[in-house]
Image (cartoon, grey):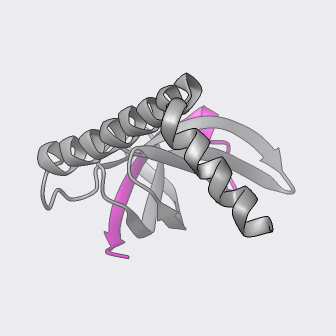
Amino acid sequence: MADMAADHGRQERAQGESTPLLEWVAGAIGAILTLALLGFLGWQAWTSPGDVPPEVTVRLEEVLPAGEGFVARIAAVNGSSETAAGVEVEGVLSRGGEAVETARATLDYVPGHSEKRGGLFFAEDPREGDLRLRALGYQEP
């Protein structure tokens, strides 16, 4: 009996009913989104540069007292799309053209097109001299 009712329902749909408009709209939106995503991924793959090394620059954010010394808070900025691991950062504090103190730190990862923050500890106040910051090197992850 249930089989007859199901067959009857299929026959009615086949004879007079078409696919509802809402189903067509939902299907079209899904197809457009899928094609747009595939197009974007293809464009990214086509236009992304090949083996470009990380471009890490270091800038000073602020200097704060820390215990018996000072901490120079820094930001390492990677302008490349490649990730840099184990980034070594060096800060050289100079006065009158002569290096007074050097501090180093290692940042675990600096992903492409992002920045990571850290700090360099100094016994002397970096605000009272010339602080030069630079990235010394990195590893490929």
Residue numbers of the magenta segment: 122-141
Q: Nearer the viewer, residue 49 or 130?
A: 49
Looking at the picture, how far across and down is residue 12, in whole percent?
Answer: 60, 40
Residue at the spot x=18%, y=47% of the render? 48
Residue 17 lies in the magenta stretch: no
Q: Position of residue 105 (x, y in %)?
A: 55, 66
User: Residue 34 is drawn in which quadrant?
Assistant: top left
**In the rendered image, which quarter contains the C terminus?**
bottom left
Query: Which residue sits at x=48%, y=53%?
Result: 91
Write down the quadrant of residue 4 in the picture: bottom right
Question: Any magenta on residue 130?
Answer: yes
Residue 24: x and y in percent read 47, 30
Q: Is residue 112 above or below residue 62?
A: below
Towards the viewer: 122 or 31: 31
Tag count in the figure?
0
The one of 25 and 139 positioned closer to us in this rendering: 25
Which residue is at the front of the view, 131 or 75? 75
Image spot of residue 81 (x, y percent): 30, 50
